[in-house]
Amino acid sequence: MTNETQDFEHLIVESKGAVATITINRPKQLNALNEEVLFELEEAIFEHLDPETIRVIVLCGAGDKAFVAGADIEEMRDLGPEQALAFARQGQALTRALETLPQIVIAKVQGFALGGGCELAMACDLIIASEKAKFGQPEVGLGLIPGFGGTQRLTRRVGLPVALDLLCTGKQRTLSGSEAFTLGLVSRVVHHDALDSEVDKVVSAILKNGPEAIGEVKRLCREAYNMTLEAGLSSEASAFSNCFAREEAQIGLSAFLNKTDPGFDKV
Ligand code: CO8
């Protein structure tokens, strides 16, 4: 299995087999998101990663302190309303695109995930957090509101009472990894030192399963937010039926009955 590293100014992009790891690499600014980082993320994910090979993307922040401490406040200071609209749309297009990728995107959150950082993590399919992580939406303290989907995704994830509390009290209330887990914001929380190994464990578990089945599960679960139960169930039934027209299901079913390994992680 070959390791590949691609060069970006603010990202470290490494691919190993079916897994790509993208590290936002501005540790001195706590990995704050500026326009260039957003462009590089788009480029890395949509132009550089081979969709035929990569099945899981792990997104993380450099250093031990922050996943992403928000949009870059220094860059935002000079924005006018039109540029702010373009910046918000750019961030929203990226976060929306992550949700519709066939790959599973995992946010590995070891520290601060604030403002745009929390919003970026919420667009990922899974958030795996250290108990030392800190999630929050402090924008109102800057006289701003979230612009990368925070009011929408946080409300859908944790419900209106907690979302409004976090969004209105700003930096006065951040959630630890454990609180975020209890509230349904993150998928798993582990001891800080166990974060890397937990992410590896989740990645290898995903890779052992049928790639097309995983893509369909992601699509259907994502669509569930925007559908009536009836429409969602109908969509699931069609997708279930389609599985039986694919080789992948034949491989998986036969492997179970023959007590062999389907080998999905060796594709
Ligand atoms: N942008 C730019 N630089 C940052 C940011 C940021 N978001 N966060 C931290 N930094 C920089 C600091 O300025 C500091 O730089 P320097 O060493 O040059 O002074 C360095 O990172 C280290 O930070 P601190 O010294 O502050 O570290 P502390 O451990 O004392 O504090 C905190 C850590 C609590 C994370 C603190 O840095 C902080 O409060 N950061 C800002 C968090 C924040 O408010 N984030 C939300 C930003 S707004 C946003 O994300 C909106 C998203 C949608 C935009 C829509 C488009 C319009």
Image: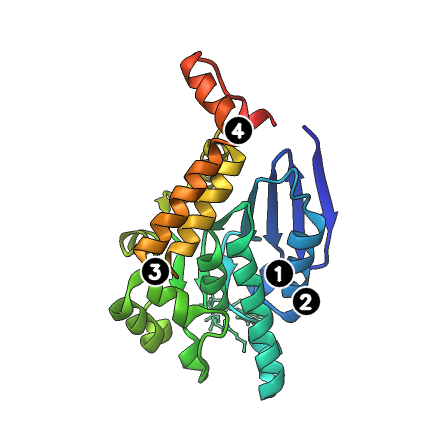
Quarter placement of the C terminus: top right
Tell me the residue that label 2 is attached to.
36
Please name the residue shown 66% across and 48% down the image.
13
Whole-angstrom CA distance, mark 1 to mark 2, is 11 Å
**Sequence-first disc among 4 and 2:** 2
Q: Residue furthest left?
A: 161
Distance, label 1 to label 3, CA atoms, is 28 Å
Task: Confirm whether residue 129 shows in the render.
Answer: no
For marks 1 and 2 on the same chain, the one whose residue lies earlier in the sequence: 1
- Picture quadrant where residue 154 is located: bottom left
Residue 227 position within the rendered picture, expressed as x and y whole percent measured from the top left: 37, 59
Would you identify the image quadrant in which residue 165 lies?
bottom left
Q: Would you call the spot at circle 4 few (<14 residues within 10 Å), some (14-19), or many (20 or more)?
A: some
> Disc 1 vs disc 3: which is toward the camera?
3
Label 3 neighbour load within 10 Å: few <14, some 14-19, many 20+? some
Instruction: Give the residue type that dot 4 points to.
Output: Glu
In this view, the mark in front (4 or 2): 4
SS for callout 2 = helix
Placement of 133 over or under 168, stated as above or below: above
Cβ of mark 1 under 8 Å from ligand 1: the answer is: no
Which label's residue is closer to the chain start, 1 or 3? 1
Mark 2: amino acid:
Glu
Whether residue 259 sits left or right of residue 180 in the image: it is right
Q: Are marks 1 and 3 in contact (CB under 8 Å)?
A: no
Q: Which residue is mark 3?
A: 157
